[in-house]
Amino acid sequence: MFTRQSVQYGEMECILGPLTLLKTDKGLCRIDFGTAEDNLPLIKAWLKKQLITAELELQQESMEPYIVQLEEYFARQRTVFDIPLDLFGTRFQKQVWDGLMHIPYGETYSYKDIATLIGSPKAVRAIGSANNKNPMPIIIPCHRVIGSNGCLVGYGGGLDKKEVLLNLEQQPSQICS
């Protein structure tokens, strides 16, 4: 069981709508699309699944360093984040998420590219599953992963949000049916 003195959360508005940010004493650990009010049940279930026992506190001020960097990203003034992260996931998931953080701003990789990048060329489906469990969209840029045919596929926030993020990074995108 992981014990944290507190887990803090706050909100911000952006071009994608509201975002809920969650942090531990070690760093940002989760971003959810939508308001805190809408996300609190999901966040509480996630904390329980991660075996995190901590007081959940609304602390908008403590989110400021994270909000500033996200706002800079949305204003096209930041291409790389340099905030502390506290990732919860399996060893493989963390390996995939680390691989995602190596996709340069404005570029896209396929699931196969990520599999090759992390040294697991046959793990394409597992890469997709780990990508889907990414707790920190935008910061860990899973939106930069596309299908091998160049089409937008799978995004937890919805393909419309993925398209907005890729267009923000000036990467032409195409949703295929």
Image: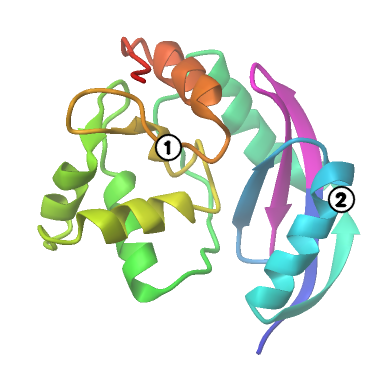
- For label 2, the residue is 59
| Label 2 element class | loop
- Give yes or no for residue 21 being in the magenta stretch: yes
In the rendering, which numbered label is found on residue 154? Answer: 1
- State whether residue 27 is above or below residue 111: below
Q: Amino acid at mark 2?
A: Gln
Q: Name the one closer to the observer, 104 or 124.
A: 124
Count of number-bearing discs = 2
- The quarter of the picture where residue 127 lies is bottom left
- Give yes or no for residue 79 being in the magenta stretch: no
Q: Nearer the viewer, mark 2 or mark 1?
A: 1
What segment carries the magenta color? Answer: 10-24
Q: Name the one closer to the observer, 60 or 125.
A: 125
- Considering every residue shown, the one lying at the far bottom of the view is 1
In the rendering, which numbered label is found on residue 121? Answer: none
Q: Name the one closer to the observer, 19 or 105.
A: 19
- CA–CA distance in space, label 2 to label 1: 32 Å
What kind of secondary structure does the magenta stretch mostly adopt?
strand
- First-in-chain label (2 vs 1): 2
Q: Quadrant of the C terminus?
A: top left
- State whether residue 140 is above or below residue 93: above
Q: Is residue 73 visible?
A: no
Q: Quadrant of the N terminus?
A: bottom right
Give the residue displayed 73% in from the left and 76% down from the top.
48
